[in-house]
Amino acid sequence: MLAEIEAEISKGEERMAGRRARVPEVTYPEQLPVSQKKGEIAEAIRDHQVVIVAGETGSGKTTQIPKICMELGRGCAA
């Protein structure tokens, strides 16, 4: 029984290592306002439990903020 549990733990660790290895390089299009404020947004996300980001349609909120969160280690189990 213990050997089975250890084998499952090892498989899980291998899967996590594989996921981490497949994370693509993060890039930010310069023309998007959210990309231009990346540092400020990252600092707010890192320092506060709740962050509200408001901006024009097409400013990059939906596409760029998840990347910022990933770079901060959010969404990836350690």
Image (cartoon, helix red, strand yellow):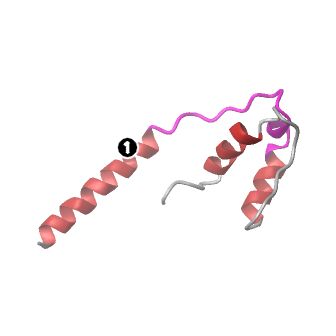
How many marks on residues? 1
- Tag 1, which secondary structure? helix
User: Could you tell me what secondary structure mostly forms the magenta stretch?
Assistant: loop
Considering the image in quadrants, where does the N terminus appear? bottom left
Q: Quadrant of residue 47?
A: bottom right
Q: Quadrant of residue 61?
A: top right
Q: Residue at x 60, y 56 (%)?
A: 74
The correct choice, above or below, for 5 with respect to 17 in the image is below
Drawn side of residue 41 relative to residue 17, left or right: right
Drawn side of residue 25 relative to residue 38, left or right: left
Looking at the picture, how far across and down is residue 3, in whole percent?
A: 13, 67
Q: Quadrant of residue 67?
A: top right
The magenta span reads: 22-38
Identify the residue position indicated by label 1 in the image. 18
Q: Residue at x 73, y 61 (%)?
A: 46
Looking at the picture, how far across and down is residue 32, in whole percent?
A: 82, 31
Q: Residue at x 48, y 59 (%)?
A: 77
> Which kind of residue does numbered mark 1 sit on?
Gly
> Is residue 28 on the magenta stretch?
yes
The correct choice, above or below, for 21 with respect to 45 in the image is above
The correct choice, above or below, for 76 with respect to 36 in the image is below
Looking at the picture, how far across and down is residue 17, in whole percent?
A: 38, 48
> Is residue 29 on the magenta stretch?
yes
Drawn side of residue 68 relative to residue 40, left or right: left
Q: Residue at x 83, y 27 (%)?
A: 31
